[in-house]
Image: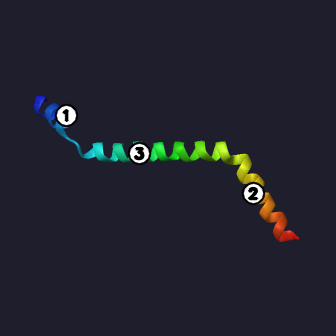
């Protein structure tokens, strides 16, 4: 039983995947924050482009 606990404690295979998951989560949070902050501006620009193409 003690050897199994030691093996689980020293095993690091899942650690890399956890780190990648955290980095991905931070990137997603950053993108959502940027889009939420600039959302109105982006909608305005797309509307201007659409109106320009429809003329």
Q: Please name the residue that numbered disc 1 is placed on.
A: 9
* Occupied quadrant, residue 8: top left
- Above or below — where is 6 with respect to 32? above
Front: mark 1 or 2 = 2
> In what element is the residue under mark 3?
helix
Q: Position of residue 10 (x, y in %)?
A: 17, 37
Q: Please name the residue that numbered disc 3 is placed on.
A: 23
Q: Position of residue 13 (x, y in %)?
A: 24, 46
- In-image side of 44 versus 14 (left or right): right
* Occupied quadrant, residue 36: top right
- In-image side of 30 versus 2 (left or right): right
The residue at 71%/53% (across/down) is 42
User: Which label's residue is closer to the chain start, 3 or 2?
Assistant: 3
The residue at 75%/59% (across/down) is 46
Q: Position of residue 48 (x, y in %)?
A: 80, 60
Quadrant in the picture for the N terminus: top left
Q: Position of residue 12 (x, y in %)?
A: 22, 42
The residue at 11%/33% (across/down) is 3
Marks 3,2: beta carbons within 8 A? no
């Amino acid at each position: 039983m003690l050897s199994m606990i030691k093996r689980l404690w020293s095993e690091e295979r899942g650690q890399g995947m956890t780190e990648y998951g955290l980095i991905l989560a931070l990137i997603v949070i950053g993108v959502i924050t940027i889009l939420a902050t600039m959302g109105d501006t982006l909608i305005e620009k797309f509307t201007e482009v659409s109106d320009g193409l429809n003329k």
